[in-house]
Image (cartoon, rainbow, N blue to C red):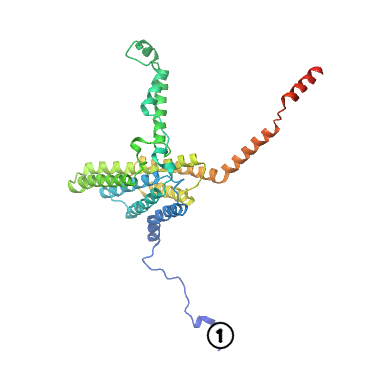
Amino acid sequence: MSENTGDGSGSYFPRIDQFYIPDWLTMQLVLNNLICFTPLFSYGTTVFSIRKSKTALGFSIDICATMLLASILRVSYYIITPYEITLLRQSLVMIFIQLILLRTSLHYRPEEYKYENLSHVEPLTQLLHDVWLEYFPLNPFGADWKQLIKSLSYKNLLGFAYKILLVLIYKFLKFFDPSYKRFKSFWQWNEDRKFWMFLAYFFLMQFCITIFVAKIMNWNALAEWIGSFMGSLGLLIESLLPLPQISILNKLKSTQGFKLILLVSWLCGDVLKISYLIFGAKNISVLFLFFALFQMSLDIYIAGQYIYYRFYFLRIRDEQVGEGEEVEMTEVKFPTSEKSQMESSGVAA
């Protein structure tokens, strides 16, 4: 009897040495599904936030364009050069959630984002003309041809090339600034149907070209070239993802409409992508790694913007306003009669 009591509950209940884990539930399966469905969580929270606030102010719909174009190109790239099925699923999930996000953003698009309310940007021809006049005569083939020859110095040519480069960079950045009007109002259309028509045309055009070249005609050399071009173009477009959001945060001086979980998902995605390109992928181009590092640098810049505008901007602005009020209080303004009396007393002294 004493021996039975000494065993305690062990004689009645079986001893569990380890938890039961199904054979199919592997760590690789968990990670693959986590990578696939991360866009649903990160961008899904943005969808709920826009619907809750009933405005898309602070969120750039250019993000939808960037991710949709890049994901569609990745799917086409898979047709030519198959890669890991997990990344293909992630691209399909990304297309699904971005279509929902685009529809929500267009439905709650504020008046500030309408095309007629956007600012004008200087035409490229005008900027190039101004740079030319800065270094060269107005009419080089007329009476000013002697002045043109004199201006063809190494210093002038180098300065002219530098200014042209700055103009091109300026126009490039302004194109990704959603507060300025674009050529043919690209992705700034007032009619929602134009967004869907553009996506449909883009999808059909590049998918038909891909299937015709790679599957019907079996032009392997051309298919490989097209696949490399699509892969590089997709990475380039995706690397430019943060530029419109940087412009919006800088204009609004606020993080309204921009979710922290979206920023965290971008940074985590950058780390995973760079880790995969360095340690997991084989025979990749240096451009792939360059675009990934470039995108990560822009995401880090957005993180700095988020921290500054969320925690420091209002406090610094209030301190500056307070200092300005103190300076105004210390300025004593005397009436004209009192000022003349003080001057006369000073002269008498």
The C terminus, quarter of image: top right
Q: Nearer the viewer, residue 88 or 23?
A: 88
Asked if residue 293 can be seen in this view, the reply is no
> Which residue occupies 39% across, 32% down?
171
The residue at the far front in this view is 337
Is residue 233 positioned above or below 124 on the image?
below
Amino acid, disc 1: Thr
Residue 245 position by quadrant: top left
Is residue 249 positioned above or below 11 on the image?
above
Tell me residue 59's x, y (percent): 44, 46
Q: Nearer the viewer, residue 264 or 321?
A: 321
Tell me residue 229's x, y (percent): 29, 41
| Crowd band around label 1 with a 10 angstrom C-alpha radius: few (<14), some (14–19), many (20+) | few
The residue at the far bottom in this view is 1
Q: Is label 1 in a helix, a strand or a loop?
A: helix
Q: Which residue is mark 1?
A: 5
Tell me residue 145's x, y (percent): 34, 12
Tell me residue 191's x, y (percent): 34, 44
The N terminus, quarter of image: bottom right
The residue at the far right in this view is 349
> Which residue occupies 18% across, 48% down?
216
> In the displayed structure, does residue 332 sit left or right of residue 272?
right
> In the displayed structure, does residue 33 sit left or right of residue 300?
left
> In the displayed structure, does residue 13 sit left or right of residue 317?
left
Q: In this figure, what is the number of numbered marks?
A: 1
Q: Nearer the viewer, residue 297 or 242?
A: 242
Asked if residue 260 can be seen in this view, the reply is yes
